[in-house]
Image (cartoon, grey):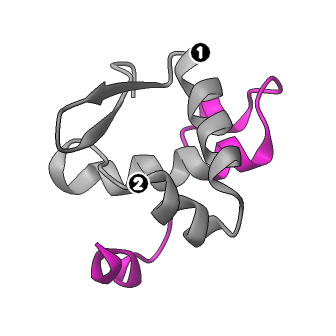
Amino acid sequence: MNNDINNLKYVEVPMIVLLDNDISSTSKLLMGLITTLTMKEGFCYASNKYLSNLLKVSRRTITSCISSLKRKNYIKVENDPNMRKIYLANFF
């Protein structure tokens, strides 16, 4: 996955998320990462550890941001036995 990140030129934050005053800037940036990582396979499988290292925040912050994005229905999370999958909401 690291090679995929190095090949990215940008992250794409949906406007509805960018303009949402109820979520943090870190959540918005995380949403951009999730959106961009989802483009390849239809879902994002990055771990909280990976995302926290990338954004230079704690894993706890990532967990909190994912929760807020789920609450706002921007993402859906499925926990398979071997891998978590994060999907974008249907309206993107």
* Residue range of the region highlighted in magenta in the rendering: 1-29
Nearer the observer, 51 or 39: 51
Reading the chain from its start, which is encountered first: label 1 or label 2? 2
Residue at the spot x=58%, y=50% of the render? 30
Q: Which residue was labeled with disc 1?
A: 71
Closest to the observer: 59 or 74?
59
Task: Check disc 1 and give the amino acid type.
Answer: Arg
Amino acid carrying label 2: it is Ser
User: Does the image show residue 12?
Assistant: no
Judge by depth and name the residue closer to the eye, 54 or 6. 54
Q: Nearer the viewer, mark 1 or mark 2?
A: 2
Badge 1 density bin: few <14, some 14–19, many ≥20, Cα 10 Å:
few
Specify the label residue 47 is tagged with: 2
User: Disc count in the image?
Assistant: 2
Q: Is residue 9 magenta?
A: yes
79 drawn magenta: no
Q: Marks 1 and 2, how far apart in space?
A: 19 Å
Q: Position of residue 9 (x, y in %)?
A: 44, 77
The residue positioned farthest toward the right in the image shown: 21
Residue 68 drawn at (x, y percent):
65, 25
